[in-house]
Amino acid sequence: MTRRFGGGDLIVATHNQGKLEEISALLAPFPVRVISSRELNLPEPEETEATFVGNARIKAHAAAQAAGKPALADDSGITIDALGGAPGVYTADWATTAGGRDFEMAMRKTWQMLEDARAPEPREAQFRCTLVLAWPDGHDEAFEGVMPGRVVWPMRGDQGHGYDPIFQPAGGALTFGEMDRWQKNTISHRADAFRKLIAGCFT
C-alpha cells in the first residue's frame, strides 16, 4: 500500500531555484507548503549510488532526517542507447570542469563519442527522472518518469538546461532547448514522474 502525503510542510531537497519553481508549480493544487533545502541551509549529501533511485533516496532521506519532515528529492539525467546507457547518473559529471559545469562541452563530447562509435541513426536516448518521497521514520515511495527521444546535432535552442539542445523528444520536431520551459514541463520525464507521484501519494 502506497503511503499518502497528509499535507503541510514538504522539504524539496534541492538548492536549484529553477527546479524548486518547477516542483512548486506541479504541487500548487495540493495542501502543501514547499520549503527548499537551501532555505533551511541543509547540506547537500554526496551522491554515491550508481542508479537514479539510489541517489534520489540519499537526498530525500538526508533532508527528511535533518528537517524532521517529509522530503522530496529527484535524480535525473540522460541515457543514450548507443553509449550503453551513459552518461546516466553521471550526466552532470560529464559537464564538470575546474570552473564549474559546462554543458556545451559535455554535449560536444557526447556527440563526438557517438561519431567515433559510428552509432546508427536515430541515436535513441531517454531523459529519466526518479522521484523519492521520504519520511523521517525512514519510509519512502519512489516513482520513475521517462521521456524517450533521440540525440540530434547541431545543438538547437537556448531554452532549458543541460542536454536539452541536443534532445528531440519522440514524436516532436523541436528539441527541448527550443521549447518554451512550461510547455516542456508538461511532457518531460519529470512531469511523467510527477503524474505517478501525485496519483500514488497526493490524490
Image: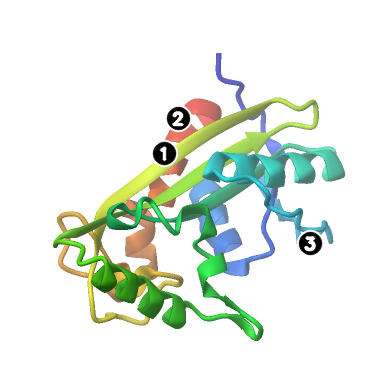
Query: CB of mark 1 within 8 Å of CB of mark 2?
Result: yes
Residue at (76%, 27%) from the top-left corner?
Answer: 138
Relative to 179, say whether 54 is above or below: above
* 20 sits left or right of 134 in the view: left
Name the residue tied to disc 1.
195
Of label 1 and label 3, which has the lower sequence position? 3
Relative to the observer, which residue lies in front, 170 or 115? 115
Q: Which residue is mark 2?
A: 199
Q: Is residue 79 visible?
A: yes
Question: Disc 1 vs disc 3: Cβ atoms closer than 8 Å?
Answer: no
The count of marks equals 3
**Residue located beneath label 3 in the image:** 39
CA–CA distance in space, label 1 to label 3: 26 Å
Q: Secondary structure at mark 2?
A: helix
Q: Residues within 10 Å of mark 1 (few under 14, many from 20)?
A: some
Q: CA distance from mark 1 to mark 2?
A: 6 Å
> Image point 45% across, 70% down: which residue?
162
The answer to whether 135 is drawn above or below residue 180 in the figure is above
> Residue at horizontal 45%, vertical 59%?
87
**Which of the two labelled residues, at mark 3 and mark 2, occupies the earlier sequence position?**
3
Report the amino acid beneath label 1: Arg
Amino acid type of the residue that numbered disc 2 sits on in the rendered structure: Ala
Q: Is residue 83 above or below residue 106?
A: above
Q: Position of residue 133 (x, y in %)?
A: 63, 36
Residue 178 x, y percent position in the rendering:
28, 75
Q: Residue furthest top?
A: 1
Q: Residues within 10 Å of mark 2 (few under 14, many from 20)?
A: few
